[in-house]
């Protein structure tokens, strides 16, 4: 079928909304009318080719919509279902069978390799294949999504806000709730207060952390951190030595920390801000960095953990996040700024500049 999609043709090019072809869903897939899609920093990294996704491609990986058609083997969904979609996984490897699809052995291939789990793409333009992204390519009017990636959204929850649950929100919240599992009353420091970091702040409040310290350089994001549950904030423009400030606040260092920036200097600060024997979780994509193994890590028996997608199983974790939202404990809708699909480049600019914490595109 012919659809409109935002095509990324080459590195650093603007998104171009064009007509493309979308193939029919296969046996374990669904055709979904996309209602909305979040814009994530990972989409920007792919556009810039800091993540080498094959181009041309249709990006977007925080989609939600309404099921229009299902493949012959799809059992748990039917046309008319409201769904949000998350990352792709193979469903067959040891990690998937353990219930940990976020570390699927084919995660990189399915989510960044330009193909679905079967090694093919459903997207083409003028007879030439386009790469898919995260098994969904949600910057489009319609998407073909594997049933493993979809989660039903209850009728009382606004569908258009739920796309970011599939990546950014579950990444930050899952880092706390699924991996760190902080003790009630403990101190946690969150470096980088974008949508992922602020989701970690909300999860820390859900976990009854006694001290929640938001660290960023943008006053608007730090204000939002306070609104969402941070007990203290540190503006690194005004207070460059965040480590010293955290040690002063806690008396001994935080009990855990999260880096959502992907910046090497911030990662090192996050690691140095925790007390001996504690853990720092990395959830932001980044490049090389230098650590002093003795001083920064081993000498204090600290752990530096990489966590993908909040180490979550979306089929279980997204419903859990929705329950927290319903109860008022996870007001992630406060992070969202809506943009029309046609204004995708404006949304991208707002997201990249920090004007929008979580830009969400509405498809018409």
Image (spheres, helix red, strand yellow):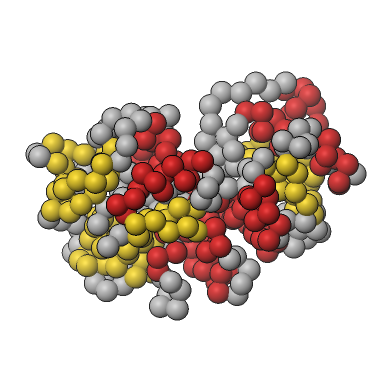
Residue 132 located left or right of residue 306: left
The image shows residue 350 at horizontal and vertical percentages of: 47, 46
Quarter holding the C terminus is bottom left
Which residue is located at x 75 percent, y 53 percent? 212
Q: Residue at 27% x, 46% y: name it.
A: 6
What residue occupies the far bottom of the structure in this picture?
156
For the N terminus, the image quarter is bottom left
Q: Is residue 304 left or right of residue 18?
A: right
Horizontal relation, residue 253 to residue 309: left or right: right
Vertical arrangement, residue 309 with respect to residue 52, above or below: below
In this rendered view, identify the residue nearer to me: 127 or 178. Answer: 127
Number of numbered markers: 0
* Location of residue 36 (image quadrant): bottom left
* Image point (24%, 72%), residue name: 79
Residue 197, image x and y in percent? 61, 49
Q: Residue furthest right?
A: 251
Q: Position of residue 305 (x, y in %)?
A: 63, 38
User: Is residue 107 shown above or below 78?
Assistant: above
Residue at the image position 54 percent from the left and 44 percent from the top: 354
Whole-percent x and y of residue 341? 32, 54
Residue 94 higher or lower than 162, as above or below: above
Between 118 and 43, the residue placed more toward the observer is: 43
- Residue 257, can we see it? no
Tell me the quarter of the picture where residue 240 sits.
top right
Residue 9 in sight from this viewpoint: yes
């Amino acid at each position: 079928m012919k659809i409109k999609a935002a095509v990324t043709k080459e590195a650093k090019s603007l998104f171009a909304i064009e007509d493309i072809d979308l193939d029919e869903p296969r046996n374990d897939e669904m055709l979904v009318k996309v209602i909305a899609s979040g814009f994530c920093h990972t989409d920007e990294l792919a556009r810039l080719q800091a993540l080498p996704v094959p181009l041309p491609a249709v990006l977007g990986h925080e989609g939600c919509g309404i099921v229009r058609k299902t493949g012959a083997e799809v059992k748990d969904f039917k046309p008319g279902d409201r769904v949000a979609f998350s990352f792709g996984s193979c469903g067959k490897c040891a990690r998937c069978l353990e219930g940990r699809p976020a570390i699927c052995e084919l995660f990189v291939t399915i989510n960044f390799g330009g193909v679905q789990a079967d090694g093919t793409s459903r997207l083409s333009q003028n007879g030439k294949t386009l790469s898919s992204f995260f098994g969904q390519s949600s910057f489009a009017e319609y998407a073909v999504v594997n049933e493993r990636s979809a989660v039903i959204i209850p009728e009382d929850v606004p569908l258009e806000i739920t796309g970011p649950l599939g990546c950014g929100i579950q990444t930050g919240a899952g880092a706390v709730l699924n991996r760190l599992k902080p003790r009630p009353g403990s101190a946690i420091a969150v470096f980088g207060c974008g949508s992922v970091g602020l989701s970690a702040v909300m999860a820390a409040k859900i976990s009854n952390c006694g001290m929640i310290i938001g660290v960023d350089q943008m006053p608007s994001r730090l204000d939002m951190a306070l609104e969402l549950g941070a007990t203290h904030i540190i503006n690194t423009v005004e207070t460059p030595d965040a480590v010293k400030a955290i040690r002063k606040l806690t008396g001994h260092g935080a009990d855990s920390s999260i880096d959502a920036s992907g910046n090497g200097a911030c990662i090192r600060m996050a690691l140095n801000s925790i007390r001996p024997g504690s853990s720092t979780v990395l959830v932001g994509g980044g490049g090389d960095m230098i650590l002093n193994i003795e001083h920064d890590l081993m000498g204090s028996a600290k752990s530096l953990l990489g966590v993908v997608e909040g180490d979550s199983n979306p089929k279980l974790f997204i419903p859990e996040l929705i329950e927290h939202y319903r109860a008022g404990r996870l007001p992630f809708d406060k992070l969202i700024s809506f943009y029309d699909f046609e204004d995708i480049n404006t949304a991208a600019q707002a997201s990249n500049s920090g004007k929008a914490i979580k830009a969400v595109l509405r498809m018409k």
